[in-house]
Image (cartoon, rainbow, N blue to C red):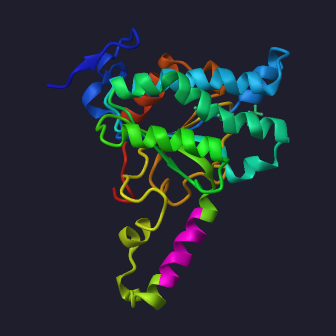
Amino acid sequence: MSMKLPFFKSKQPEQNDLELINVPNHVAIIMDGNGRWAKKRGLPRIAGHKEGMSVVRKITRVASNLNIKILTLYAFSTENWKRPKSEVDFLMKLPIDFLDIYLPEMIENNVRIETIGDFDTLPKSTKEAIQHAKDRTKDNDGLLLNFALNYGSRTEILRAIKHIVSDVSEKDLPVDELDEQFFAKYLYTEGLCDPDLLIRTSGEQRLSNFLLWQLAYTEFWFTDVYWPEFTEGIFKEALLDYQNRKRRYGGI
Ligand code: FPP
């Protein structure tokens, strides 16, 4: 029997209750709209990012309580370096602040912290704080909180190709063995299942160079709400919508 979490009052309870046994394994989120949220309030853009950080904590807690296995959050793209230096500096400091405040809570809740993206070229202090969090949480087997940081999907795919070419020439890797599963091992997401659900906030409906390979069969869900206004209720609305979808993977 499935456990049901009452969510909406409705005439069709079976379609409007979140089924706790059928939550997606992997949810990916493009947390967009921090800047516009701040602008709407006459605040500097960084105020939106700061508020966005506390929403990360809130949604991590919900995901963990719902037994979602992986939460991948797009925190900084390879294209975000084009922003003004002051904003980039702030965004690079956010993971440090986040971990300063919330790492104990993450450890207590059995959350494992990881990143995807070009880790080596991050500022030293950002790398150190994150590496510390990775080391402290590496044995946790609850939610995997996976930050896409300095991440770009096209770069990821090119990087994979370069490694494969090098393995073909240096390790005699047989080209015939190169199939989808094999290729996926060369991506940052090696070993992770593909996202089941992608959420993007703020009304934009594009991928912005996020997980282009991994999202091939992912269900997409969009909301006009800016990330700093994203709530547990809206998150559960997305999960409920996901549960009512029929995934066919190209079949019938
Ligand atoms: C996009 O909004 C958001 C980002 C580029 C940064 C996302 C970062 C956070 C939500 C905080 C992350 C927290 C941790 C712990 C790393 P935008 O600035 O592009 O918004 P806009 O489209 O309204 O300008």
Principal secondary structure, stretch drawn in magenta? helix
Q: Can I make out residue 201 in this image?
A: yes
Vertical side of 163 occupied by 19: above or below = above
Q: Quadrant of the N terminus?
A: top left
User: Which residues lie in the magenta part?
Assistant: 156-166
Residue 69 placement (x, y as % from top left): 34, 38
Vertical side of 48 occupied by 250: above or below = below
Residue 153 placement (x, y as % from top left): 60, 58
Residue 117 placement (x, y as % from top left): 57, 54
Farthest left residue in view: 1
Which of the two residues, 26 or 92, is positioned nearer the viewer here?
92
Vertical side of 175 occupied by 98: above or below = above
Which of the two residues, 144 or 251, is positioned nearer the viewer here?
144
237 vs 193, left or right, is right
- The residue drawn where x is 33% and y is 56% is 252
- The residue drawn where x is 50% and y is 47% is 115
- The residue drawn where x is 48% and y is 17% is 233
Quarter where residue 152 is shown: bottom right
Query: Is residue 165 within the magenta segment?
Result: yes
48 vs 24, left or right, is right
Query: Is residue 60 within the magenta segment?
Result: no
Quadrant of the image where one finds ligand 1: top right
Q: Can I make out residue 245 in this image?
A: no
